[in-house]
């Protein structure tokens, strides 16, 4: 069930009043949340609902096991079992065929003809998100950052909470589980905030992302015939498409959650205004960045082992982060690329600090140049991310470098019509350093914004019901 569908609008319109009529009975509310979350997930493929249930039950049991053991070896064994089961399930469905193909190709190049068995399984939607979230619960119990819950309904509702189930944000048990366990009361101001986030998220999805998606699909589909101008426009279009698509999903998820009395973590904070690769990862997919930092990078040693080990840990973290996104070498190379960006930034950071101008105007200009440079470094990574093969990425990059041109108006004008208003709004948010400034403007400014957004959705929205990009991960 897609957020940008009439089916979801009906689903949520029926759920909301029913849910708040049960506010005096939080246990019943949680049962309702669990039931509708399972229904929401089953609308894609009911067969994979069993995987979600299995993941929930085994981490619920592992959490109790960890908490009940006093010996460090048995506690570690419980965590290891949780990780093995979760990662094993993820690897079986998502990565087996990828590694089988890679091994078969490598053996063929070495002169050995081996036919590998392939599973050819459909990927359960959202499996990367809910396995990470469920697994982090057991790790946090092991670290004694949270007490295990003995209420299975509460834990199952935490894992399967439908707004963020299939595409995040990845919520920590220390943040979301207490909200599930505690009482919730309807708050009109929070409802208004949630409605605004839903509206803004839909605007980014159906107006920005889905319209740009038409350009991206067309240009990437005939990449061999593109000149440099159209190849570059395809990359720019995808950069804003994936931002509008993924941040739009997160805004809707946060808005729906607010309407239900929950607070989900901020997942995007104007990422294309980052002035360095490191800052980008504090603004883009924040929940995944923090998860990889806290559960992988720090576990590897973080920056505690010296310069070379820090670089190694950064590279491992980003490579695995790339592989998390998908079972393809383009994702692995995307992770390698971002690892190199982070390592390179650490190397040149002392120099950048020394040449930072003292004058306020010069410093602002210098920061603007760094933002533009960082954006283009990120766009180069998006080319790898979107390309179907390394050959395609290199071919489009060659066209950009060796055959520059001005894109035709048939592609450039639709791109500008969609992207320029988005950038204007985001520039205002960035300069104000306030993501919610629209809600605090005078009523007539808010009215103008909502009216313009409404007409943009009605007249310019792409209502093809296109799936969100991150559902494939």
Image (cartoon, rainbow, N blue to C red):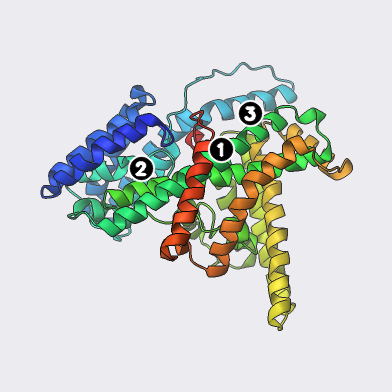
Residue 275 pos. (x, y %):
65, 64
Q: Residue furthest left?
A: 24
Q: Is residue 278 left or right of residue 122?
A: right
Distance in Å between CA atoms under marks 3 and 2: 36 Å
Looking at the image, which residue sits at the far front? 444
Q: Are marks 3 and 2 in contact (CB under 8 Å)?
A: no
> Could you tell which of marks 3 and 1 lies nearer the N-terminus?
3
Write the residue at 52% across / 31% down: 95
Q: Quadrant of residue 80?
A: top left
Whole-Å distance between the Cαs marked 3 and 1?
43 Å
The answer, for residue 279, to whether it is visible in the render is yes
Is 388 placed left or right of 451 in the picture?
right
Camera-side residue of 296 and 463 = 463
Q: Are marks 3 and 1 in contact (CB under 8 Å)?
A: no
Specify which label sits upstream in the sequence, 1 or 2: 2
Count up the numbered dots: 3
* Any part of residue 205 in sight: no
Residue 155 image point, x, y percent:
24, 45
């Amino acid at each position: 069930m897609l957020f940008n569908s009439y089916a979801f609008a009906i689903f949520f319109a029926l759920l909301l009043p029913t849910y708040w009529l049960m506010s005096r009975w939080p246990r019943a509310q949680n049962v309702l949340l669990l039931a509708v979350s399972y229904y929401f997930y089953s609308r894609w493929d009911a067969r994979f609902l069993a995987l979600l249930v299995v993941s929930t039950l085994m981490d619920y049991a592992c959490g109790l096991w960890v908490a009940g053991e006093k010996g460090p070896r048995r506690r570690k064994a419980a965590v290891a079992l949780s990780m093995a089961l979760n990662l094993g399930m993820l690897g079986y469905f998502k990565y087996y065929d990828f590694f089988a193909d890679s091994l078969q190709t490598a053996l063929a190049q070495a002169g050995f003809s081996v036919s590998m068995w392939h599973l050819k399984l459909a990927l359960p939607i959202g499996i990367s998100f809910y396995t990470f979230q469920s697994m982090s619960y057991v790790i946090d119990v092991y670290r004694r950052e949270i007490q295990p819950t003995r209420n299975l309904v509460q834990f199952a509702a935490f894992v399967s909470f439908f707004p963020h189930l299939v595409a995040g944000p990845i919520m920590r048990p220390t943040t979301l589980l207490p909200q599930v366990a505690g009482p919730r009361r309807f708050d009109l101001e929070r409802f208004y905030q949630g409605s605004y986030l839903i509206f803004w998220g839909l605007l980014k999805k159906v107006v920005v992302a889905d319209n740009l998606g038409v350009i991206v699909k067309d240009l990437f589909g005939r990449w061999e015939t593109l000149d440099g101008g159209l190849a570059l426009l395809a990359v720019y279009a995808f950069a804003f498409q994936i931002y509008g698509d993924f941040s739009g999903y997160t805004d809707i998820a946060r808005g729906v959650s607010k309407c239900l009395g929950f607070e989900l973590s901020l997942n995007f904070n104007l990422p294309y205004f980052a002035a360095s690769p490191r800052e980008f990862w504090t603004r883009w997919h924040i929940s995944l960045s923090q998860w990889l930092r806290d559960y992988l990078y720090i576990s590897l040693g973080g920056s505690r082992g010296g310069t070379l080990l820090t670089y190694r840990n950064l590279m491992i973290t980003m490579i695995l982060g790339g592989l998390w996104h998908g079972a393809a070498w383009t994702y692995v190379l995307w992770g390698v690329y971002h690892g190199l960006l982070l390592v390179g930034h650490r190397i040149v950071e002392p120099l950048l600090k020394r040449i930072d101008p003292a004058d306020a105007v010069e410093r602002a200009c210098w920061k603007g140049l760094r933002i533009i440079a960082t954006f283009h470094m990120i766009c180069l990574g998006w080319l790898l991310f979107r390309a179907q093969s390394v050959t395609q990425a290199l071919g489009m990059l060659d066209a950009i470098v060796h055959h520059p041109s001005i894109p035709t108006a048939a592609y450039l004008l639709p791109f500008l019509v969609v992207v320029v208003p988005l950038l204007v709004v985001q520039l205002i948010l960035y300069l104000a350093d306030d993501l919610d400034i629209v809600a605090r403007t005078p009523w007539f400014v808010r009215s103008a914004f909502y009216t313009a957004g409404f007409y943009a959705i009605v007249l310019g929205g792409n209502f093809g019901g296109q799936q969100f990009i991150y559902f494939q991960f």
